[in-house]
Image (cartoon, grey):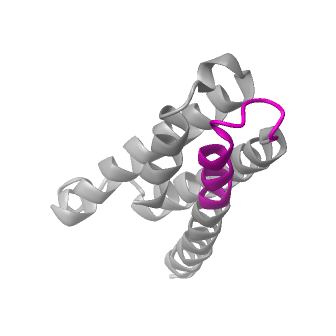
């Protein structure tokens, strides 16, 4: 939900005039789609039907990459928000920056729990 909020706050503005917001949009939409995809896989328990895939490793890689790229996108988003660019879009861009950092912290927490799960699987 928070990732959806990040990209909808930016998509409602003239973000295409500023390349930095294009990068934030790419990261936000890309990981939102992948998160929904993995959510559907886990909710339908499809992962139990495909035992060849190392799901703990996939989850760790997914969450780790999402955390890293979202952190970069959040920093780019925050550094690109200025009142001088366009005061009409300022509030949306500032809110998207805040929520990008919140999403980053959520992915960081999920990366930690994925690492704990991955580590317990490799020790067995």
Percent from the top left, x then y, of residue 106? 57, 69
Task: Check residue 85 for magenta coloring.
Answer: yes
Farthest residue in the front direction?
Answer: 88
89 lies above or below 60: above
Task: Check residue 12 for magenta coloring.
Answer: no
Percent from the top left, x then y, of residue 77? 73, 43
Q: Residue at x 84, y 44 (%)?
A: 79
Q: Is residue 11 left or right of residue 81?
A: left
Percent from the top left, x then y, of residue 82? 82, 40
Of 4 and 86, the residue lying toward us:
86
Of 70 and 81, the residue lying toward us:
81
Q: In this view, does 41 lie to the left or right of 81?
A: left
Q: Give the residues in magenta.
A: 82-100
70 lies above or below 57: above
Classify the position of the N terminus by image quarter: bottom left
Percent from the top left, x then y, of residue 64? 63, 57
Say how many tags the image has. 0
Q: Residue at x 48, y 34 (%)?
A: 12
Q: Residue at x 58, y 80 (%)?
A: 116
Q: Which residue is drawn at 30% across and 58% down?
A: 39
Of 84 and 9, the residue lying toward us:
84
């Amino acid at each position: 939900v928070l990732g959806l909020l990040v990209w909808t706050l930016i998509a409602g503005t003239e973000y295409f005039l500023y390349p930095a917001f294009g990068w934030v949009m790419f990261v936000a939409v890309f990981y939102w789609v992948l998160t929904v995809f993995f959510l559907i896989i886990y909710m339908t328990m499809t992962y139990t039907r495909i035992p060849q895939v190392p799901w703990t490793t996939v989850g760790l890689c997914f969450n780790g990459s999402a955390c890293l790229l979202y952190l970069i996108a959040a920093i780019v988003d925050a550094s690109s928000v200025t009142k001088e660019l366009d005061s009409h879009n300022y509030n949306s861009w500032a809110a998207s920056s805040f929520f990008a950092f919140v999403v980053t912290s959520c992915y960081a927490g999920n990366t930690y729990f994925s690492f704990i799960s991955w580590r317990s699987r490799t020790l067995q």
